[in-house]
């Protein structure tokens, strides 16, 4: 970086340390290009060992963002202890269950896991079948339309 370039940069950014090493431009900014007012300078902590970088305003942040390590393989970490915990939380969220309903489900699961209870529903059809059998024990309902004459007699 020439003395003239440094003067331009520090006149645009008067609070910058003149000892800052920005001589290694990023790939989109070559040393031969002149510095512009909207250029973005990235400074790193001196202990990081990284040199400062100057990016063009138009190109800043366009690079492919890095995914945090492990996110592709285990997206639930570090928020949940297991994939199943994450999936359970996802179902609770999608269903919009309230805290009391969630606590009840967790208690049921824990009871079964301890061996103090059993869970025999294997799919949605089993659940529906159980409701149909239970409905036969309830008072049946019969709907019928009344004529105006029948309505008058009832009143």
Image (cartoon, rainbow, N blue to C red):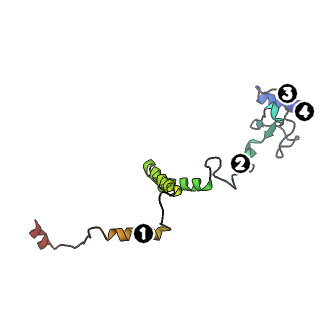
- Name the one closer to the observer, 110 or 150: 110
Query: Is disc 2 in contact with disc 1, using a CB cutoff of under 8 Å?
Result: no
Q: What residue is disc 1 on?
A: 128
User: Regarding mark 4 in the picture, which secondary structure is present there?
Assistant: loop
Category of crowding for the residue at label 2, using alpha-carbon neighbours closer than 10 angstroms: few (below 14), some (14–19), many (at least 20) = few
Residue 108 appears at what percent x and percent y? 47, 55
Q: Nearer the viewer, residue 37 or 123?
A: 123
Rendered image: mark on residue 68: 2
Q: Residue at x 85, y 27 (%)?
A: 19
Q: Are marks 3 and 4 in contact (CB under 8 Å)?
A: no
Look at the picture and state if 30 lies above or below 142: above
User: x and y percent of residue 27 in the render?
Assistant: 84, 46
Q: CA distance from mark 2 to mark 1?
A: 43 Å
Quarter that holds the C terminus: bottom left
The one of 43 and 12 positioned closer to us in this rendering? 43
Marks 1/3 in contact by CB < 8 Å: the verdict is no
Residue 105 locus on image (x, y percent): 47, 54
Q: Rate crowding at label 1 as few (under 14), some (14 to 19) or many (20 or more) other CA atoms within 10 Å.
A: few
- In the picture, the disc for residue 2 is 4
Q: Which residue is mark 3?
A: 19
Is residue 99 placed above or below 120 in the rendered structure?
above
Q: Nearer the viewer, mark 3 or mark 4?
A: 3
Horizontal placement of 74 versus 110: left or right? right
CA distance for labels 3 and 2: 32 Å
Q: What residue appears at the point 11 percent right and 68 percent down from the top-left corner?
A: 154
The mark that comes first in sequence, 2 or 1, is 2
Alpha-carbon distance for marks 1 and 4? 78 Å
Q: Residue at x 78, y 41 (%)?
A: 55
């Amino acid at each position: 970086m020439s003395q003239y370039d440094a003067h331009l940069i520090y006149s645009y950014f008067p609070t910058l340390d003149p000892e800052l090493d920005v001589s290694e431009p990023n790939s989109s900014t070559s040393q031969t290009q002149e510095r512009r007012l909207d250029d973005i300078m990235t400074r790193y902590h001196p202990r990081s060992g990284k040199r400062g970088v100057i990016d063009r305003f138009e190109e800043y942040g366009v690079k492919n963002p890095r995914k945090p390590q492990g996110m592709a393989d285990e997206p639930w970490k570090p928020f949940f202890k297991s994939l199943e915990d994450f999936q359970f939380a996802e179902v609770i969220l999608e269903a919009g269950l309230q805290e009391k309903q969630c606590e009840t489900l967790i208690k049921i699961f824990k009871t079964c896991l301890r061996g103090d209870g059993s869970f025999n529903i294997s799919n949605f059809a089993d659940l529906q079948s159980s409701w149909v059998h239970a409905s036969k024990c309830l008072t049946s309902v019969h709907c019928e339309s009344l004529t105006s004459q029948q309505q008058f007699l009832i009143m």
